[in-house]
Amino acid sequence: MEKRICTNCGFVGSPRKYTKGSLVWEIILWLLAIIPGVFYSIWRISTRYEGCPVCGAPHMIPEDSPVAQKMLKNI
């Protein structure tokens, strides 16, 4: 997997996948009523992102980008 650099904390490595919301709430909404469960599931899927495993920020850029090269020189 391609290494990336977090512009927030400077971490160098592979990003982690994050999904907003709670799986427990999703299951509860599915059990209580189907319609809210569907909407909550769609919202959770649409808010997935790859972020920094250290700080959780979604600001990770490829290691070979000009901004990343500049950050690596300053370290």
Image (spheres, helix red, strand yellow):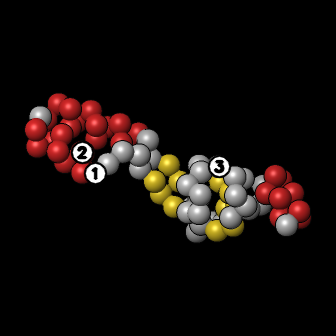
How many residues crowd mark 2 within 10 Å: few (<14), some (14–19), many (20+)?
some
> Marks 3/1: CA distance?
24 Å
Amino acid residing under circle 1: Leu
Q: Nearer the viewer, residue 56 or 38?
A: 56
Q: Earlier in the sequence, mark 3 or mark 1?
A: 1
**Residue at left offset 69%, top offset 52%:** 8
> What kind of residue is marked 3?
His
The numbered mark at residue 59 is 3
Sooner in the amino-acid sequence: mark 3 or mark 2: 2
**Alpha-carbon span between mark 3 and mark 2:** 27 Å
Residue 60 relative to residue 43: left or right: right
Coordinates of residue 52 in the picture (x, y in percent): 59, 58
Q: Residue drawn at (83%, 53%), measured in percent from left and top?
A: 66
Secondary element at tag 1: helix
Which sits in the foreground, 62 or 57? 57
**Res. 61 image quadrant:** bottom right
**Residue beneath label 1, please?**
23
Q: Relative to 36, say whether 55 is above or below.
A: below
Q: x, y (%) of residue 27?
A: 19, 48
Image-quadrant location for residue 41: top left
Q: Which residue is drawn at 46% across and 53% down?
A: 18
The C terminus is located in which quarter? bottom right
Q: Residue at x 28, y 51 (%)?
A: 23
| Mark 2 lies on residue | 26
Q: Do the residues labelled 3 and 2 touch (CB within 8 Å)?
A: no
Q: Which mark is residue 7?
A: none
Q: How crowded is mark 1: few (under 14 residues within 10 Å), some or many (20 or more)?
A: few
Looking at the picture, which amino acid does disc 2 mark?
Answer: Glu
